[in-house]
Image (cartoon, helix red, strand yellow):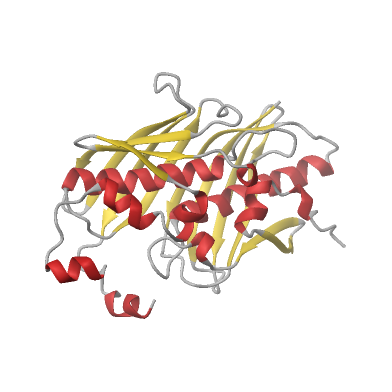
């Protein structure tokens, strides 16, 4: 049984935006946020910034999970994030899950995906580069 | 919105008025974004520091997420400012390179210029800084798509 990701690992920003841990998938946390005024951009659609916030937090949560499992707890410093917007985020619950593409001693590269009711139809994806100090 | 329909025409895009409208509600309203400055092809917005926007449990530094939102919003504004009209656009791709954390308890400013736009795409670049534009917190580059005739316009009326 995979341990769940502790909600208090999420930063203030994530909790304030309404991001929560939905479940674990292949031992990595799936983060979720429901549609609401906090995340709305164009009427009836997710704001690109809110989608990016969910992706970014899912990336950090995935990396943190793997690092803690390895007994590491470094300070994570963002180097960059590139977000691709694939389709409009509608007024629905949205999920995101990060995968670790490369984990080194000093940096990590992550790929993160976000979707709504159809797991196969992504609304956005991101690539993140994170420095570990 | 009703004011514009009364006058019958949308005037040229005005970033000051647009900010008043956009930042009243939704994600940018929740973030507390403010108008800061603009030029012919650029717009600068301000993201005030706030405790519930912090990214790390033991520091007072803003999370990077709100900075992405700030830059996304300033990007859109710069495109409308450059084209002088408000047309629906969608973010295709946005890249943010973080040079350093923003200083504690200070606003972050996002200044973005639209350096090229074609009939269907607009290209932007900009910096996020916390007071001194020559000492940036982050650089941003993005591509937006104009949605001239959105086939989902009917659907949007319901939203």
Question: Could you tell me which residue is drawn at 46 percent across and 60 percent down?
Answer: B26
Which percent across, then down, holds residue B146? 24, 57
In the displayed structure image, the side of residue A115 where residue A26 appears, left or right: right
Residue B54 lies in quadrant: top right
Q: Nearer the viewer, residue A72 or A7?
A: A7
Q: Is residue B143 visible?
A: no
Please report the residue visible at 55 percent of the width from the left and 25 percent of the height from the top. B100
User: Relative to B23, is B134 above or below?
Assistant: above
Q: Where is residue B97 drawn, in percent x and y?
A: 48, 32
Q: Nearer the viewer, residue B22 or B91?
A: B22
Pinpoint residue A11: horizontal percent, then vertical percent. 69, 46
**B69 versus A118 height, above or below:** above
Q: Toward the viewer: A60 or B127?
A: B127
Quick one: quadrant of the N terminus of chain A? bottom right
Please name the residue shown 28% across and 54% down the image.
B145
Q: Residue furthest left?
A: B8
Left or right of B1 in this view: A70: right
Q: Nearer the viewer, residue A30 or B124?
A: B124
Q: Is residue B141 above or below residue A115?
A: above
């Amino acid at each position: 049984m995979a341990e769940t990701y502790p909600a208090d690992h999420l930063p203030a920003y994530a909790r304030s935006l309404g991001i929560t841990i939905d479940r674990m998938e292949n031992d990595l946390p799936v983060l979720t946020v429901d549609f609401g005024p906090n995340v709305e951009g164009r009427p009836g659609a997710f704001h690109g910034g809110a989608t990016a916030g969910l992706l970014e937090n899912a990336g950090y949560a995935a990396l943190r999970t793997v690092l803690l499992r390895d007994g590491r707890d470094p300070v994570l410093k963002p180097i960059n994030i590139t977000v691709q917007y694939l389709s409009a985020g509608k007024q629905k619950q949205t999920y995101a899950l990060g995968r670790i593409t490369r984990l080194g001693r000093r940096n990590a590269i992550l790929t993160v995906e976000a979707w709504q009711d159809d797991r196969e139809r992504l609304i956005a994806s991101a690539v993140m580069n994170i420095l570990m100090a | 919105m009703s004011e514009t329909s009364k006058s019958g025409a949308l005037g040229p895009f005005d970033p000051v008025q647009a900010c008043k409208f956009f930042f009243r509600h939704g994600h940018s309203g929740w973030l507390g974004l403010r108008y800061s400055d603009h030029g012919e092809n650029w717009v600068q917005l301000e993201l005030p520091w706030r405790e519930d926007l912090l990214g790390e449990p033991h520091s007072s530094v803003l999370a990077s997420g709100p900075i992405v939102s700030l830059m996304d919003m300033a990007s859109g504004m710069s495109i409308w400012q450059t084209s002088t009209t408000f047309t629906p656009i969608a973010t295709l791709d946005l890249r943010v390179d973080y040079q350093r954390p923003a200083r504690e308890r200070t606003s972050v400013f996002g200044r973005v210029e639209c350096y090229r736009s074609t009939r269907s795409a607009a290209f932007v670049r900009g910096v996020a800084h916390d007071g001194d534009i020559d000492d940036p917190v982050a650089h941003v580059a993005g591509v937006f798509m104009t949605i001239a005739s959105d086939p989902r316009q009917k659907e949007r009326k319901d939203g």
